[in-house]
Image: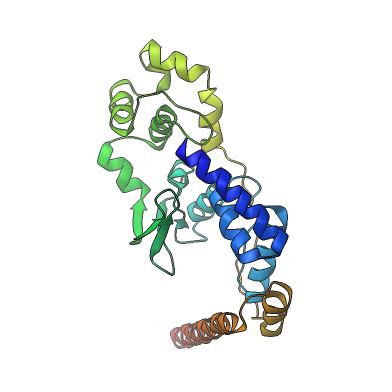
Amino acid sequence: MKRREMREKATLEWHKALEKGDYATAFSKAVMTSRLTRPLIDDSKHLLSLLGIPFVQAPSEAEAQGAHMAMKGEVWAASSKDYDSLLFGAPRLLRYLTISGREFLPSKGISRPLNPELIELDKFLGRYNITREQLIDIAILMGTDFNEGVKGVGPKTALNLIQKHGNIETLPIEFKLRLETQNFETVRRFFLQPQVTSDYTLSYSELDEDGLYEFLCDQRDFSRDRVETVIQRMKAFYAKKKQTELKQWFRARRSDL
């Protein structure tokens, strides 16, 4: 109830920010309401292009796409607050990778410090002696974004049930019947066979400094000082990246001699 009230309040603030053209506030409120509009998504993609940062348009769930890329070894880990990345098969999940190192809690009106957290799927499954398929069944029992789960069943109970019975199909009838009405097989298949794409590139392009000032300052009314700070950081990043690539090239040349 309280979370719904917070979302409704954020939705009103989101509409007001859009009417005023305050896109920075609108984006923050959209995140709180889980309503990222098409214009906000397009702006984000345009901004990444101006920064020279590659991005991938996921055909379905972002966590599924990130897990797919991590499973292929094209990225080192999937980064998300959401544990769904593990259900989608990400071999590594990196949580709380932030610049500020803090998280705002809307329901309490306060922020808390965050420390990066790395979860390795194989080690996690080995610790509890379960498979990824069983982890998915545990999540379905507790409830996911796609099903309600069984009321009163938390992490410990769900883990004990699956460790004892193996999977949802062999659970006691009272649990199985509740999950059958929630199409648990469809939810399970969604995690095991998500819609993803391999049609992307992960190469960086050039930083468009003039384009950033025009887009963020002239069109979106961001502070020029703040934009300049970001640009200088990106310049430093690209300079360091080029030095690293040059050193790797020299090492490769020496090894060929």
Farthest-out residue, top: 173
Q: Is residue 13 visible?
A: yes
Query: Residue 78, how many percent across, how many down?
Result: 47, 55
Left or right placement of residue 175 versus residue 159 in this view: right
Q: Nearer the viewer, residue 152 or 198?
A: 152
Query: Residue 16, how many percent across, how many down?
Result: 66, 56
Left or right placement of residue 191 versus residue 198 in this view: left
Above or below residue 162? Residue 21 is below
Left or right placement of residue 142 versus residue 159 in this view: right
Give the total number of marks visible in the rendering: 0
Which residue is drawn at the image coordinates 63% and 54% (left, top)? 14
Q: Nearer the viewer, residue 245 or 4?
A: 4
Which residue is drawn at the image coordinates 35% and 56% (left, top)? 118
Farthest-out residue, left: 127
Which residue is drawn at the image coordinates 48% and 28% (left, top)? 148
Q: Is residue 199 visible?
A: no
Query: Residue 66, how many percent across, how many down?
Result: 53, 53
Above or below residue 256? Residue 105 is above
User: Is the image coloured rainbow, by chain, by secondary structure, or in one colour?
Assistant: rainbow
User: In the picture, residue 143 is in which quadrant?
Assistant: top left
Query: Residue 88, how many percent across, how many down?
Result: 49, 43
